[in-house]
Amino acid sequence: MSRVRLHQLLIGMALAMGACTPLPRSGSAGPRAGDATVAVQNNFAETLAIYAVSTGGASFRLGTVASAGRGTASVPGMLLTKPGVRLVARPIGPGRALSLPCAPIVHGSTVDLVLDRNLALTNCWVR
């Protein structure tokens, strides 16, 4: 393999790895005023990317959660200006995205999300 191709391959791998950011751990910078907090337990067999999507279609990637992993993230207040923000889980790799069954998420909400082995049986509680 030539040096140029190897260099291109390494840059591509570095960019791809940077796109898969895990959800921040508890204890990292907390949510700002107006944000909603999402706590995720992933019991699904694959790593999932979690998104917050507004009614207008604006999407914000909260991060990823490994199989059998946990994570906590914040939904930015700027997405919560209109009611109807929903959470979406998308497997990393092939697979369909799933819009998760949550009550409306508003400023200051705390969301507990438990992703089941069968994504259709996922549970979501909003407090």
Image: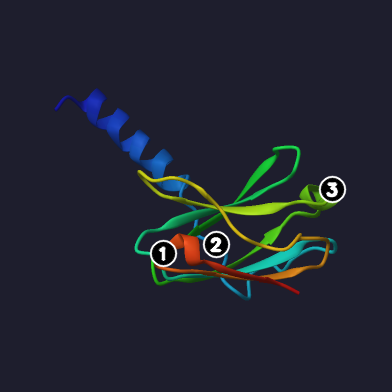
Which residue lies under the disc numbered 3? 82
In the rendered structure, the answer to whether residue 92 lies left or right of residue 87 reads left
Q: Residue 27, percent across and down? A: 63, 75
Identity, as a three-letter code, of the amino acid under mark 2: Leu
In front: label 2 or label 3 = 3
Q: Residue 3, percent across and down? A: 21, 27
Sequence order check, earlier mark of 1 and 2: 2
Identity, as a three-letter code, of the amino acid under mark 3: Lys
- In contact (CB < 8 Å): disc 1 and disc 2: no
Query: In the structure shown, which secondary structural element does the residue marked by tag 2 occupy?
Result: loop
Q: Residue 9, percent across and down? A: 28, 33
Which residue lies under the disc numbered 2? 23
Q: CA distance from mark 2 to mark 3?
A: 24 Å
- Of all residues, the one furthest to the left in this rendering is 1
Q: Which mark is residue 118?
A: 1
Identity, as a three-letter code, of the amino acid under mark 1: Asn
Query: In the structure shown, which secondary structural element does the residue marked by tag 3 occupy?
Result: loop
Quadrant of the frame with the C terminus: bottom right
Q: Quadrant of residue 43?
A: bottom left
Q: Quadrant of residue 93?
A: top left
